[in-house]
Image (cartoon, coloured by chain):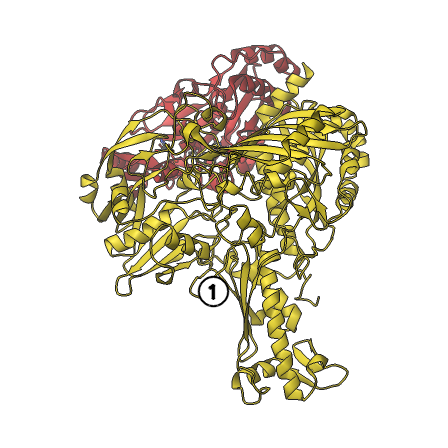
Amino acid sequence: MYATSYHRASSVADAVKLQSASDEAKYVSGGMTLIPTMKQRLAAPSDLVDLRHVAEMKGISVNGSRVRIGAATTHYEVSSSAELKAACPAISHLAAHIGDPHVRHMGTIGGSIANNDPAADYPSAMLALGATIITNTREISAGDFFTGLFETALEEGEIVVAVTFDAPAKAGYSKFPNPASRYAMAGVFVTKAGDGSVRVAVTGAGSNGVFRHAGLEAALAANWSADAAAGVDIDATDLLSDLHGSAEYRANLVKVMAKRAVAAA
Amino acid sequence: MGVEGIGARVARKEDKRFLMGQGKYTDDMFVPGMRYAAFVRSPHAHAKIRSIDTSAAEEMPGVIGVLNGKQMLDDGIGNLICGWMIHSKDGSPMKMGAWRPLAHDTVRYVGDAVAVVVADTMGEARDGAEAVVVDYDVLPAVTDAVKALGTGQPQLHPEAPGNLIYDWEIGDGAATDAAIAAAAHVTEMKIVNNRLAPNPMEPRAALGIYDSAEDHYTCYTTSQNPHVARLVMSAFYNVAPENKLRVIAPDVGGGFGSKIYIYPEEIVCLWASKRTGVPVKWTSDRTEAFLTDAHGRDHVSTVKMAFDANNRVTALKVDTIANFGAYMSLFSSAVPTYLYATLLSGQYNFPAIHANVRAVYTNTVAVDAYRGAGRPEATYLLERTMETAARELGVSPAELRRINFIRSFPHQTPVIMNYDAGDYEASLEAAMAAADWAGFPARKAEAAGRGMKRGIGMSCYIEACGIAPSAAVGSLGAGVGLWESAEVRVNAVGTVEVLTGSHSHGQGHETTFAQLVADRFGVPLDSVSIVHGDTDKVQMGMGTYGSRSGAVGMSAVVKALDKVEAKAKKIAAHLMEADESDIVIENGALKVAGTDKSVPWFQMALAAYTAHNLPSGMEPGLKEGAFYDPANFTFPAGCYIAEVEIDPETGKTKIVQFVAADDFGNIINPMIVEGQVHGGIAQGIGQALLEGVHYDPETGQLLTASYMDYTMPRADDLPSFQVSHQVTPCPNNPLGIKGCGEAGAIGSPPALMNAITDAIGNNDLTMPATPQKVWAAARAATN
Ligand SMILES: Cc1cc2nc3c(=O)[nH]c(=O)nc-3n(C[C@H](O)[C@H](O)[C@H](O)COP(=O)(O)OP(=O)(O)OC[C@H]3O[C@@H](n4cnc5c(N)ncnc54)[C@H](O)[C@@H]3O)c2cc1C
């Protein structure tokens, strides 16, 4: 690791000020992605601005079906919140299967979506839940937020403060972990809203990051069942191929995980 | 046995310091003035070094020295060597290319060291290493051994045309071919043994300390055999004469073979300490470990197994290509020859065997012994083929094995080994009973009802441990003898120190070796200390690998204990005015049998040291040494059964039960033996289902250089193991023990692959059987 200076932000405004004071400053939340990258000398921020102690970025609130999760909320908190488990158990289930206990107690939802790893779990939930990403300057719909591999709509210095969404009538998440990293080889988040509209988001499998699957959405809107998902042809053309799984294998996993997500919803 | 003696489940004495985080590893050593080394490593798999510009690095903050390979050459530091001479079948010696500790001319794998930076802090050393500018002329690379043998491939070493190191054979080729021609059935297979990274929990480290006043060097290092390290560094690398070089291997956090070898880094730290005038420490990070620790396995073989009309084996013919990586590591040449092909008879009565082995250079890190070393490769090849033959012949796998078991001992195989004792059927029976083999069809049907494909597979392994009879291995090309040494010191107060030339890096010597003493003299385990790992404290020894510490290392201790016991009895007899032959040792006292006369152990010891009243002519003191050279290898054997369930939708394998029935001969501490078996099976499961090193075939970049891509087995990948022991004592050593350190890793991969291929009905599957591969193979079987 290169030498760096640590700052603890007390508010969102303070964080922005600290970050803008240097050209090479970076926000740090759980540090579960950023710190290993720094240890490998692949990132060299001059300053780290810690967001974990900003009160307005912490905590989970559920108002009727309206859910707000502060960006600095850890995966463990999302997995264990009784309110959230009642409103949207699928997202708690998702959080409970990220990494290991250490990672879940440090890593945050804001850090995860800001990082937008193509194999991370949360981005699929955000897309399928039609979540809104609230930053220090604006609100961005999830559909506009995730723009590519490790790419988001965030501007330089912009902070994810919270995410909000309406808890759907039904939601399910199923993930096939990469045997080595345990990130998603294919993770499928399905939701069915009160009005019957269906969203299906896929992570881990797309060569351009998280995406919605129109074919699965149409089939499940017509018939919300595992069998309906099983009948959908998954095109492997734009899927990832790597050491752990070919595009063809991932296409199969997308279908199987979609079936299981519907069954779990 | 007593509560602390031979056969007792004594908790490990060393665990307290390990569990409390108070172990003392090489990286825990701090000496005054110590600085840190970082290596500049080749980012290319194959390149000529045009120039190395160190000027910017030398100006970096904290940097006190930047050293390169030319300087090392100027200082007369020698090439790294392979210490086992193999001759090709045409009689020519193996073709060893030069391995420089710091490459000055050509780099041959990603990670090859080209320079070292010494600085005040580790961070500054790394900054300095990044500032060294190496101008490379990149050459084409080859990573696959089969491909490297072909025409028009990149050539690694001028000494080895066609990248061929040796072309070796064993056994009777003509008899084997004749038996195959006459066979009723021949099973043919292509067998790939996947390449593995050893991954000890503690990465390698070295601390070199040069004392200019004494012209003396001290090396702390993560070694499984500090004396061998000292011998090699002085005799071949020209670092310093043995009396001027002390090697200390303190607590070492696992090795699995990878810490047998002498690597460039420890030599460089010693040399750099003299060059810079400060102690120099280097600690590998995990990525460096993946890049530079010697890998294991990586064989591609074809095999023919011939049977007569009664399903008896008549011949085995094997052709193996072994990937050696870019340089010949210390014991590499012995692995696919005398540690592999000599075990190809397995547990079976083969009249004829012939094996041909070609060793090949590629642009990958060196390959050498890794837990099991050659025996896992032999067992995997044999047991996959035996299972396949059973399927082809329509015989049950147990029956085919039973028909062919060796049943009388000693048994001379066609490939050098002379098996001394065993009962293969006993382990087979025990394993099948524990696994409820007979109940499998019902379990399979029940699983099918849940949409799961269930399979069962077995493997009957044999291996050779207790390496090794020195004259025998010498005649086969070994550069060293493989005896072991011990010294037993009884102190004046009766406490006991045992100095052993073997080395514990997780095996539990401090407990099991002490149990021998407690058992013999009835003294408390607490009063016995085991000293190892320091060439200044311990007499010459050969270290720990090849499951040799018990069979060879403990046998040396027994020999020394015999001498101590004899002298102690003489002293006691003299003190009690009794006949020496009437003295027995019980519960910490020396007694005159059949009387109530006794002398406490400590009083006898005190008498030895006061020397006020010793038998006339007896030397004072009570300290005896012994060297033990085994008469033969030992032959642990057993039967493993794996039962798996495959999710056909995803290809994921779940191990639903795993049974190990092992014959390790007599057992000193069953708890430690079970731990060794568990760890070995975990690594075997790793090889079969999870682990595999991948290099990019074009660029030679290591694709599995972290745990993001290299799948280490984790607790939830493993089932609970059912372990049992059958005992046929080894007739060739005083304790009757065979060795248990590697069996788990040897016996388990074929059992798993036999189970998985049984489940999916497709035998065309290579390790690691990842979900993707199993899914594809299962689909191919149903389509
Ligand atoms: C061993 C291990 C296993 C893992 N397994 C999984 C897994 O199975 N599934 C999975 O999804 N993830 C996994 N992760 C990643 C983990 O979830 C991380 O916590 C997450 O990706 C990043 O969150 P963080 O809070 O740690 O962010 P950090 O590492 O602190 O930051 C990541 C990036 O986001 C930026 N950032 C952080 N917070 C904000 C914010 N509020 N606004 C704007 N930018 C911000 C930082 O500047 C940095 O660029 C794993 C990580 C590890 C170490």
Q: Chain of mark 1?
A: B
The chain coloured yellow is: B
The answer to which quarter of the image holds residue B529 is bottom right
Amino acid type of the residue that numbered disc 1 sits on in the rendered structure: Val
Residue at mark 1: B538
- In this rendered view, identify the residue nearer to me: B485 or B657: B485
Q: Is mark 1 within 8 Å of ligand 1?
A: no
- In this rendered view, identify the residue nearer to me: B197 or B165: B165
- Judge whether B711 appears above or below B202 on screen: above
- In this rendered view, identify the residue nearer to me: B709 or B734: B734
- SS for callout 1: loop
x, y percentage for residue B242? 38, 60
x, y percentage for residue B543? 51, 55
The answer to which quarter of the image holds residue B686 is top right
Q: Is residue A8 visible?
A: no
- In this rendered view, identify the residue nearer to me: A24 or B618: B618
Position of the N terminus of chain B by quadrant: bottom right
Q: Is residue B65 visible?
A: yes
Q: Residue at x 20, y 46 (%)?
A: B61
Chain A color in figure = red
Q: Residue at x 36, y 32 (%)?
A: B158
x, y percentage for residue B122? 30, 48
x, y percentage for residue A36? 39, 38
- Judge whether A42 appears above or below B776 on screen: below
